Amino acid sequence: MIIQPKTRGFICTTAHPEGCARQVERQVDYVRSQPSISGPKNVLVVGASTGYGLASRIVSSFGAGANTIGVYFDKAAEGSRTASAGWYNSAAFERLAENAGVKSFSIVGDAFSEAIKQQTIELIRSELGQVDLVVYSVASPRRTHPVTGETFSSVIKPIGPSYSNKTVNFHTAEVSIATIEPATEDEVRQTVAVMGGEDWQMWIDALSEAGVLSEGATTVAYSYIGPEITHAVYREGTIGRAKDDLEATAIRLREQLGATGGRAFVSVNKALVTQSSSAIPVVPLYISALYKVMKEKGSHEGCIEQMYRLFSTRLYGEGDTPVDSRGRIRVDDLEMQEDVQAEVAAIWEQLSTDNINELTDIAGYRREFFQLFGFETDDIDYEADTDPNVDIPNLR
């Protein structure tokens, strides 16, 4: 079939297997071009098929030579429907890992469920023995609690008064004002239940109790803070409340794992084009301005550069892992430099539909969005007949 992008708002409903594979290959090539990392040997990545989770798995395997297990919820092609981008990404990763002689296995299912946790434990026990790094990178709009059975849905809303600011339709480059009504107490509760730290804690508890988490193991989850421009809808909103819970979980896990020399961190990462960030009002416009400034300064990083720097200079660098006053790793340091933020703020004040192409990298944002799904990738013939049915090696 001829596979072309089909969008619905901030979602692309199709994905291109060859384009996705090429994007994964480029990430692998980048890591291979860098010095090797003396790091983890057996890694579990929960939420492993896109974004920072996928990049973490690539860095683990091709930077540190680690064996990996990836857990993710993605769908295979069916009839006229393509597979999800994460499915194609994972298939490409598994083939490259297999060719490199590195063990890798995939488990597809609901990471929040007890069944998937137990399946993962059995796979670790039979194939790896134990894991010494657990990366938690789950991004989901809903979660069904494995004990109570309650299904929670997250929302992206401010807490307190309603919030209005500039936003952009990145498909059309039209700048407008978005107004978001505040969350109810129950919406805050549900967002924390989906995006907070409870499931991360459950994973670590299950792995520890089963004896498949090594002594001295490290675990890391990912977060974001961002500038004042985005705080009302992000860090001070419902998502921020969930991230506060995630950080509180890291403190508990640090104490829990520290008894045997283990470590637990939240890594605060840079703003990047992801399907999740595309769904948050204001944020795509901010990222477009940020990309313009950081690319001009030569300090821009994508997912793979961020994760390589996290692993090589923070998690497994020389000496103790540097953290801020709240115990968080900060690889958003380049984004949050004063000169960068001052230039972004100056651009923000001027932004309109008339000047967005001049003042921001909205074209780059749009291109990266489609590349998430395997489109707008160099050297791919998008008019060619392509088989959407792709198998994932080592799928369990």
Image (cartoon, rainbow, N blue to C red):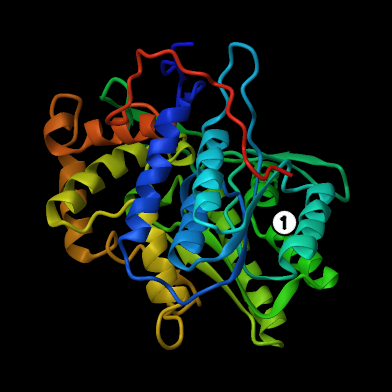
Q: Position of residue 365 (x, y in %)?
A: 29, 36
Q: Position of residue 198 (x, y in %)?
A: 72, 59
Q: What's the residue at 23%, 31% (across, down)?
A: 363
Please tell me whether residue 111 is drawn above or below residue 351 in the rendered image: below
Q: Can I make out residue 136 in this image?
A: yes
Q: What's the residue at 27%, 63% (across, down)?
A: 334
Q: Give the crowd class for mark 1: few <14, some 14-19, many >=20 residues within 10 Å.
A: many
Please tell me whether residue 215 is drawn above or below residue 18 in the rendered image: below
Please tell me whether residue 226 is drawn above or below residue 286 in the rendered image: below
Please tell me whether residue 185 is drawn above or below residue 248 in the rendered image: above
* Local SS, label 1: helix
Quarter of the rendering occupied by the C terminus: top right
**Left or right for 149, reference 88:** right
Viewer-side residue, 353 vs 134: 134
Q: Can I make out residue 272 in this image?
A: no
**Left or right for 357, reference 131:** left
Residue marked by disc 1: 199
